[in-house]
Each structure stands twice: as C-alpha cells, then as structure tokens.
Image (cartoon, grey):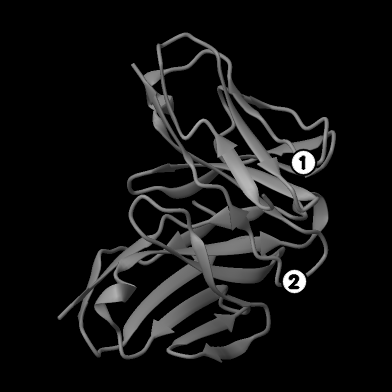
C-alpha cells in the first residue's frame, strides 16, 4: 500500500463547477499535508497546506483534513480551464525516525472544459 | 541566483553507464529530496537528507546512490543506468522545523537511458 493514495482520475468537470480531489494517507506520523499543482512539463507548485483538523480556505480553494480518518481533500470552486493540471497530495512526517520525510501521492489529472 | 537548480536539464545515457544528477540550493535548507516522476506514479521518493552527511532511503532507492557533504548540494548517482530509470527527476528542499514547510522544487532533469 502506498503511503499516500489519491482518488483515481482523470477528473473532468465543466467550467464553473466544483472539483473535488481526495487523498488518504497511512502513516500516522504525518502531521502536515500539502496540495501541489503541476502543469505539463513544469515543476510542482504549492497551492495550500493544512495541519489542523477541519477546513482551510484560500480564495477558490478549500483544503479539508480529518486525521481520525487519515483523509485530506481539496475543493476547487468555480473551476476554470486554467485549473487543468495534475494535482499532487503530499504528507510531511513529523515524528520518529522518518522525521522530515515528504511523500507524494500518484496525482490526479484534472481537466476543466469550457 | 537564489533558489534550487538542477543540472543537467536533459541527459541521454547508455545502459550500464554511471550518471550523476546535480542539485544545488542557496537557501541553506536542512532537508533535500530526490524524486522520480513517471506516468501514473506521481512523485516517488528516492532518497532524502535531513542535513549534511545524513541521508535516508525513500520508496524506490534501488540503483541510486546519494551523498551530501555540503548542505547546499545533494547529487544523485545512478551507478549503472538501466532503461527502467528513464524518468523525470526532481530535486526539492525544505527548511527544518515548521509545520508549513513548503517544498521548493528544481526545474527537473529529464533522463533517457538507451
């Protein structure tokens, strides 16, 4: 089992809709979680991070964390064609012998069509 | 220039040859990471380092060697390249100690083993 798993894609949504991206993690030593966006041929870039249970909003993006269920999600409201990219979930380990380890999921390809 | 840089950007090598990918960061970040990215697998962690002379294996370390004699450099060596190591390699760095420790990525190195 991968340490970080993302919902299988690709995901296609119409412009203006809400895109929902999901991620689960297996290592309970993970304490911080990150969502990165990666355009084709480019390096990943950070969208949001979250480390407290609950919701965190930043513009059109909302990250949700449920540590009991080991679940992280990203909602993109009012999706735009420019949001079309691969979205990567990452877990940062802050405990034990794996302190500092940053593990990514396999990514979800999102396409927003006009 | 400040930042994290990888070299070379593109490399073609033959099966069995040794090849080294370079990574240099100017922020004095404690943590550095090497990932490979293949279609359908997201970013898979090869090795990471918490500080100079401290390295640890990630998810897919076989066939790779790392060293970190200086904080700012983290080279990745393929001892005897195989076709399965054809991939895009990303180096990343993060500072130590904060929960919102964003990882900063290099531009990537596209390696082809023929």
Which residue is label 2 attached to?
A: B99
Label 1 packing within 10 angstroms: few (<14), some (14-19), many (20+)? many
User: Does residue A56 sit above or below A37 in this rendering?
Assistant: below
Label 2 packing within 10 angstroms: few (<14), some (14-19), many (20+)? some
Q: In x, y percent, where is residue A103?
A: 59, 54
Quadrant of the image occupied by residue A112: bottom left
Quadrant in the picture for the C terminus of chain B = top left
Q: Judging from the image, what secondary structure is the residue with disc 1 in?
A: loop
User: Does residue A15 sit above or below A92 in this rendering?
Assistant: below
Q: Are marks 2 and 1 on the same chain?
A: yes
Quick one: which residue is furthest to the top in this view? Answer: B16
Q: Chain of mark 1?
A: B
Mark 2 or mark 1, earlier in chain: 1
The residue under the point 45% across, 79% down is: A74
User: Does residue B86 sit above or below B52 in this rendering?
Assistant: above
The residue under the point 53% across, 91% down is: A57
Which residue is label 1 attached to?
A: B72
Q: What distance separates the C-alpha of mark 2 from that of mark 1?
A: 22 Å
User: Does residue B80 sit above or below A91 in this rendering?
Assistant: above
The residue under the point 40% across, 11% down is: B14
Q: Judging from the image, what secondary structure is the residue with disc 2 in?
A: loop
As drawn, is B36 to the left or to the right of B25?
left
């Amino acid at each position: 089992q991968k340490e970080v798993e993302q919902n299988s894609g690709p995901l296609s949504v119409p412009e203006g809709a809400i895109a929902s991206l999901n991620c689960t993690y297996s290592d309970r030593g993970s304490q911080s979680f990150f969502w990165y966006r990666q355009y084709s041929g480019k390096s990943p870039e950070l969208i949001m991070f979250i480390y407290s249970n609950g919701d965190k909003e930043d513009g059109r993006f909302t990250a949700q964390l449920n540590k009991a269920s080991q679940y992280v999600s990203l909602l993109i409201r009012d999706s735009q064609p420019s949001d079309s990219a691969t979205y990567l979930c990452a877990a940062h380990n802050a405990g034990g012998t794996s302190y500092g380890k940053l593990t990514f999921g396999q990514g979800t390809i999102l396409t927003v069509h006009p | 220039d400040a930042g994290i840089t990888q070299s070379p950007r593109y490399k073609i090598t033959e099966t069995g040859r040794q090849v080294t990918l370079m990574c240099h960061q100017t922020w004095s970040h404690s943590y550095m990471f090497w990932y490979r990215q293949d279609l359908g697998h997201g970013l898979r962690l090869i090795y990471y380092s918490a500080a100079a002379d401290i390295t640890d294996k990630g998810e897919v370390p076989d066939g790779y060697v790392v060293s970190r004699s200086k904080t700012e450099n983290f080279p990745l060596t393929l001892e005897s390249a195989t076709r399965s190591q054809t991939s895009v390699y990303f180096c990343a760095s993060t500072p130590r100690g904060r929960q919102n420790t964003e990882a900063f990525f290099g531009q990537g190195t596209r390696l082809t083993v023929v």
